Image: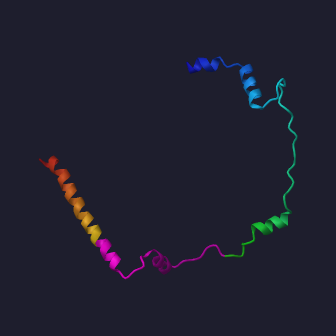
């Protein structure tokens, strides 16, 4: 059905659609000539380079030592938070083991 519909589309149909959309002026089957324009620079090259490199003298990166990296990723606190998290992880592990054993039980029979 789609194949038949596409076969019924003629060049005249396409031309009429382009005219209705405003791509072509009515009665003119040829495409209008396009004038080539040369783009003028918006600002002089040296001014552009100054704009682009205005912060070129600024450091945008730094060299971190291993100690600096560890200091940033380690939690800030008195250590109690870590103990609480460890306790929670242990409880989760125990629950997972129980669930796993229960899930395997029917297969072991």
Which image quarter: residue 20?
A: top right
Between 59 and 23, the one lying in front of the other is 23
Q: Residue at x 29, y 67 (%)?
A: 89
Q: Residue 50 location, x and y as percent? A: 79, 69
Q: Residue 41 location, x and y as percent? A: 85, 57
Q: Which residues are magenta?
A: 59-86
Q: Residue 22 location, x and y as percent? A: 77, 32
Q: Residue 80 location, x and y as percent? A: 33, 79
- Residue 58 magenta: no
Count of labels shown?
0
Which image quarter: residue 49?
A: bottom right
92 w.r.t. 56: above or below:
above
Task: Quadrant for the N terminus, please.
Answer: top right
Q: Residue at x 37, y 82 (%)?
A: 78
Q: Residue at x 61, y 73 (%)?
A: 61
Q: Residue at x 72, y 76 (%)?
A: 57
Between 47 and 64, the one lying in front of the other is 47
- Residue 64 magenta: yes
100 w.r.t. 81: above or below:
above
- 87 relative position to 77: left or right: left
- 61 relative position to 29: left or right: left
């Amino acid at each position: 059905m789609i194949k038949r519909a596409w076969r019924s589309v003629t060049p005249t149909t396409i031309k009429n659609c382009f005219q209705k959309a405003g791509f072509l002026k009515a009665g003119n089957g040829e495409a209008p000539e396009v004038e080539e324009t040369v783009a003028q620079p918006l600002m002089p090259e040296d001014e552009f380079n100054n704009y682009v490199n205005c912060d070129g003298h600024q450091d945008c990166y730094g060299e971190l030592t291993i100690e600096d990296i560890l200091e940033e990723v380690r939690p800030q606190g008195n250590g109690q938070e870590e103990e609480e998290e460890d306790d929670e992880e242990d409880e989760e592990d125990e629950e997972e083991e129980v669930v796993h054993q229960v899930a395997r039980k029917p297969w072991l029979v």
